[in-house]
Image (cartoon, rainbow, N blue to C red):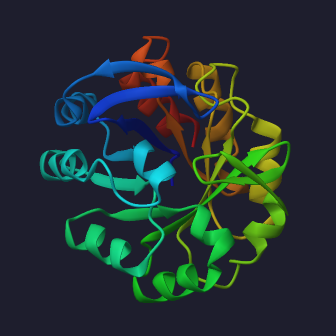
Amino acid sequence: MSLIVFPAIDLKGGQVVRLAEGDMARATVYGEDPPAQAMLFAQAGAEHLHVVDLDGAFAGSSVNGEAVKAIVERFPGYVQLGGGIRSRESIERWFDLGVARVVIGTAALDDPELVREAAHDFPGGIVVAVDAKDGMVATKGWADVSTTSVVDLARRFEDAGVAALLFTDVGRDGLLKGVNLDATVDLARAVTIPVIASGGVKGIADIHMLALHARDGIEGVITGRALYDGRLDLAAALSVARAAS
């Protein structure tokens, strides 16, 4: 199984943006047409897409729903969605609209039973986000930092049937510092759940190194700013991911 490369579309006010360290005040706008951006990724060969409703992550419910629906309707592959999904109703609504997987972050810490029930009822559809600030879980759009460690949270869902863990080093996100390979591999080795790496991808070397660790349980990698800034070519990244694995 080759490493999955997930190009990212982060939505704020209906626009395609990227944040630095999850800070809404440090947003760079990359486009006004999210579905068109999704199609550019598809044309480069992407079969998976990672979409985040940034406003929703802070509001606790969907804010950019129309943009998400438009992306799902246009993109021919699998759409993975996160941001403010904290209720059974919202989980069901997104699956009904054609989202392939939903990412649950804050609710995984606050309401783990919601995750367990959803993972049971929607096999292969639930991803748990474990966002880290200095090894501790950050929630509510990364505005709050808990006293729970990333590994402790991940292990709570070992037997729940979740599809993957989405691990983000918040301190690197959107800064092009390079992915936190050691922390990502350590988490993948500590649990049996596949891990998706996120935060800080700056170039093709990150893709190659993560692909080499696919056997350790790293399922995929999310990349955004490096693509938008032209530092990473998506077609090349997909090719490297296939070759290394």
Point out residue 167 in the picture as x, y percentages from the top left corner: 66, 50
The residue under the point 39% across, 25% down is 234
> Relative to the observer, which residue lies in front, 216 or 24?
24
Horizontal side of 25 relative to 17 (left or right) equals: right
Look at the picture and state if 223 lies above or below 159: above
User: 69 left or right of 53?
Assistant: left
Rendered position, 98 above or below 15:
below
Q: What residue lies at 75% left-to-right and 47% top-to-bottom?
A: 132
Which quarter of the image is occupied by the C terminus? top right
Classify 236 as above or below 11: above
- Left or right position of 73 against 236: left
Q: Residue at x 35, y 47 (%)?
A: 48
Q: Residue at x 82, y 52 (%)?
A: 136
From the viewer's perspective, tell me whether residue 89 is left or right of residue 198: left
Q: Residue 56: x and y, percent?
A: 41, 51
Figure disc tally: 0
Residue in front for this viewpoint, 22 or 235: 22
Q: Can residue 219 be seen by looking at this rendering?
A: yes
Residue 83 visible from this viewpoint: no
Q: Quadrant of residue 114?
A: bottom right
Q: Nearer the viewer, residue 7 or 142?
A: 142
Q: Quadrant of residue 13?
A: top left
> Percent x, y for residue 52?
42, 46
Q: Taking 227 as reference, is 144 above or below it?
A: below
